[in-house]
Image (spheres, rainbow, N blue to C red):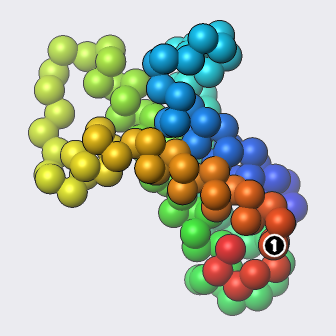
Amino acid sequence: MMQVYFLSVLFNAAAGLILITGERSNDTLLSNKSFRLVTGICTLVTGFLKLFIIAQPDIIILGDLLPAVAGLAGGANILIDYYREYTTVEISLSAFFHKLFITGRKYVGIICIIISVLHFLFPRLSIL
């Protein structure tokens, strides 16, 4: 379905920009808390939908695996960051998830943007 394909490209790129810029952004849109929350939720939901809805009828499981994983990781990263900012309760994450969601958020953002661009340019590729 092409609508979910478009949303996947759009939200993966937006999540990547949010994760790369962080709070340092002077742009009011990327540093807006509500925009970050809505983008995180929409990216997570679209990533989940991409697991089941593919752009072109091809291999069902591998059809859009990388955009789905990028959407899930980017959306979860934004939502965990939002939760950590507004709560006093500490989150205890394992070493892998701490490295993925807290110290490596810029790398997740770069990967989200790269996968978004590749998914836009090559929609029929089997794994993209």
Residue 42 placement (x, y as % from top left): 62, 39
Residue at x-position 65% and y-position 10% = 28
Front residue (pair 21, 40): 21
Q: Is residue 103 left or right of residue 7?
A: left
- Is residue 68 in view? yes
Residue at x-position 63% and y-position 51% = 113
Q: What is the three-letter code of the residue carrying label 1?
A: Phe
Image quadrant for the C terminus? bottom right
**Secondary structure found at label 1:** loop
- Label 1 neighbourhood size at 10 Å, few (<14), some (14-19), many (20+)? few
How many circles with numbers are drawn on the protein? 1
Residue 40 placement (x, y as % from top left): 54, 36
Residue at x-position 58% and y-position 63% = 68
Front residue (pair 52, 19): 19
Q: Is 109 placed above or below 1 here? A: above
Residue 79 placement (x, y as % from top left): 43, 34
Can you identify the residue that label 1 sits on?
122
Q: Is residue 123 left or right of residue 107?
A: right
Q: Is 23 placed above or below 103 here? A: above
Front residue (pair 24, 91): 24
Q: Is 103 placed above or below 36 here? A: below
Residue 31 placement (x, y as % from top left): 56, 16
Residue at x-position 74% and y-position 65% = 119
State the image quarter where residue 127 is shown.
bottom right
Seen as rendered, the residue at the extreme bottom is: 59
State the image quarter where residue 87 is shown.
top left
- Is residue 49 in view? no
